[in-house]
Image: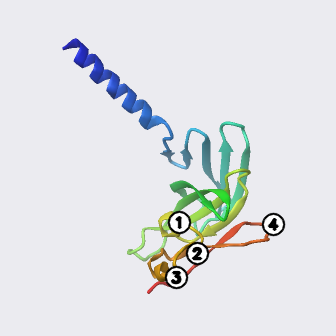
Amino acid sequence: MKRRLRNSVLILLLGSATQSLGQTTYNGSTVETPELRIELRPVGDDGFEIGLTDKVVGLRVGHEFEGEGANDPSPFLLAHGRYCDTSVIMLTVEYPWRHDLPEFQRVLSTFAFSQSDFAFIDVAYGSLTDIALAEETAYDPADLDMLPPIRVRCLIGQDEKPFEFFEKATK
């Protein structure tokens, strides 16, 4: 009996340790992983800063943006991906909706940053889940109608940014 109880406790401890590896924690205006901390701070009346900190090497970069009518957005979704041979951090932020249209509760925008140096790449006006998982030419033309509305276009030969988001009307 003691052995079975000890094994059960050991299994529970190992399971909880495994779940904490790679865990993403959202706390108010911050989102953290074991390697990365992203903090959103108000700037003026209608702006905010996204501050990215690499917790391993200590690199910290901040980017200021307009606030879609608010300077207090909060992190909504975080993902790491690869577009156009570039490792990226994708952060969807949620802005509170402060208008008289009750059918809307929030506005979402997704920001893409280079994972290597935190350089800003582009912003898509929608959630991370509305963005195609690969560059548009990676898909069979017959499947294009099934893709999410926000697509990715590689910018070959561009020094400033490796890709851009664009919206494609869906049927």
Pointer 2: what residue?
A: 136
Q: Secondary structure at mark 4?
A: loop
Query: Marks 4 and 2, how far apart in space?
Result: 20 Å
The quarter in which the N terminus is drawn is top left
Pointer 3: what residue?
A: 141
| Residue neighbourhood size for the residue with mark 2, other residues' Cα within 10 Å, grouped as few (<14), some (14–19), many (≥20) | some
- At a point 54% along the width and 54% down the height, the residue shown is 79
Q: Secondary structure at mark 2?
A: helix
Tags 2 and 3 touching, CB below 8 Å: no
Mark nearest the camera among 1 and 3 is 3
Instruction: Say what amino acid the circle numbered 1 marks.
Output: Leu
Seen from this angle, which residue lies furthest top?
Answer: 2
Seen from this angle, which residue lies furthest left?
Answer: 1
Quadrant of the rendered structure where residue 119 is? bottom right
Pointer 4: what residue?
A: 159
Query: Marks 1 and 2, how far apart in space?
Result: 9 Å
Instruction: Say what amino acid the circle numbered 2 marks.
Output: Glu
Pointer 1: what residue?
A: 133
Across and down, in percent, residue 158 comes to: 79, 70
Q: Earlier in the sequence, mark 1 or mark 4?
A: 1
Query: Marks 1 and 3, how far apart in space?
Result: 15 Å
